[in-house]
Image (tube, rainbow, N blue to C red):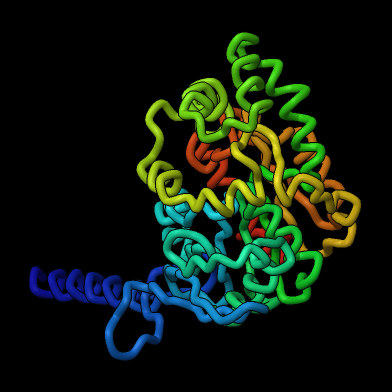
Amino acid sequence: MKSSFLLILLSIVFFSCTQKPEDKSGGSTTVADYFNYGDSGVQSAGVKLIPIHTPVGDFKVWTKRFGNNPRIKILLLHGGPAMTHEYMECFESFFPKEGFEFYEYDQLGSYYSDQPKDSSLWTTDRFVEEVEQVRKAIGADSSNFYLLGNSWGGILAMQYALKYQGNMKALLVANMMASCPEYGKYADEVLAKQMDPKVLAEIRAIEAKGDFSNPRYMELLIPNFYHEHLCRLKDWPDGVNRAMKHANEEIYVMMQGPSEFGIAGRLANWDIKGRLKEIKVPTLMEGAKFDTMDPKVMEEQSKLVQHGRYLYCPDGSHLSMWDDQQVFMSGVIQFIKDVDQNKM
């Protein structure tokens, strides 16, 4: 009797160990399948430099792939412009568990990619064409391509969708209004009034002089604005600090302006709010209570697109992927699953 019971027990153990775990995105896969990128030769941990053609020459951009899922390929677009993928590394703690294939990516001009000096490259339209080339390089198409952009990455994602949504499965916009003039107005009329009047007066005096290289400018903004509206964690995550350290200030100032406190530069008049109705693909708009972007406008945007959903982060700011992480990640993951299962 004992030997028969032992044989049955061993059979159960063997059977359970040889089964493929369920892939949360649907179907089944193994860990080996998930991390099989089809590489031959030297393995590079998913890092690949993708060639990019531009009007002024050919360059390379840095990407890093996680996972293998032909049904769900997510490209992450960082903010800035010319910040880095580093502050988006938090997705590594969430997406692999869901079986999603996703890509971290430094846009041209950012720290890990080529950094050409021709200023004609730094336009929204040129960046859109870059994203399209990256999409082709990762083998994504309308059946599986999810584009997730935060801040400036949200501008880029929306602009890309207006031209290339036929190549997309879904769009996710985190913490970015569709109108930079509205963003600037919100900073002036709402956020500035929440600041200590003496601090605000000193900040405005520095701005009036154009003395943005003055160390005092950031000494005032970091505790009084950035820690209130950019990332509210007491100790900023290492990835956020590295992204700030590695920012390409020349491109950032040229396009965004000298700080996150309002908008200037080439993006100052960017406004596609009136065109949101053209976006047909399922779209998630995420806003946060303490964001530099008006969360009510983010909700409005979710209703302007044809198939929208709104995600609100009550404890979040501009980087709510960090300071309201569980709400943010749960909402993003659920949206991706719902799109994958045709529930949007």
Percent of width and height locating residue 10 = 17, 73
Q: Quick one: 101 or 77, which is closer to the camera?
A: 77
Determine whether 234 is above or below 248 in the image.
above
Q: Residue at x 50, y 53 (%)?
A: 248
Q: Quadrant of residue 259?
A: top right
Q: In which quadrant is the C terminus drawn? A: bottom right
Task: Give above or below for 28 relative to 227.
Answer: below
The answer to whether residue 319 is left or right of residue 63 is right
**At which x and y percent is residue 95?**
47, 58
Locate the N terminus by quadrant.
bottom left
At 69% from the left and 34% from the top, the residue drawn is: 262
Choose top left, top right, bottom left or bottom right for residue 127.
Answer: bottom right
- Residue 191 higher or lower than 256, as above or below: above
Residue at the (41%, 26%) spot, across then down: 234
> x and y percent of residue 342 in the render?
72, 66
From this viewpoint, which residue is outermost toward the bottom?
40
Q: Is residue 12 visible?
A: yes
The total of numbered circles placed on residues is 0
Q: Position of residue 26 (x, y in %)?
A: 54, 69
Q: What residue is drawn where x is 69% and y is 69%?
A: 126
- Note whether residue 94 is visible: no
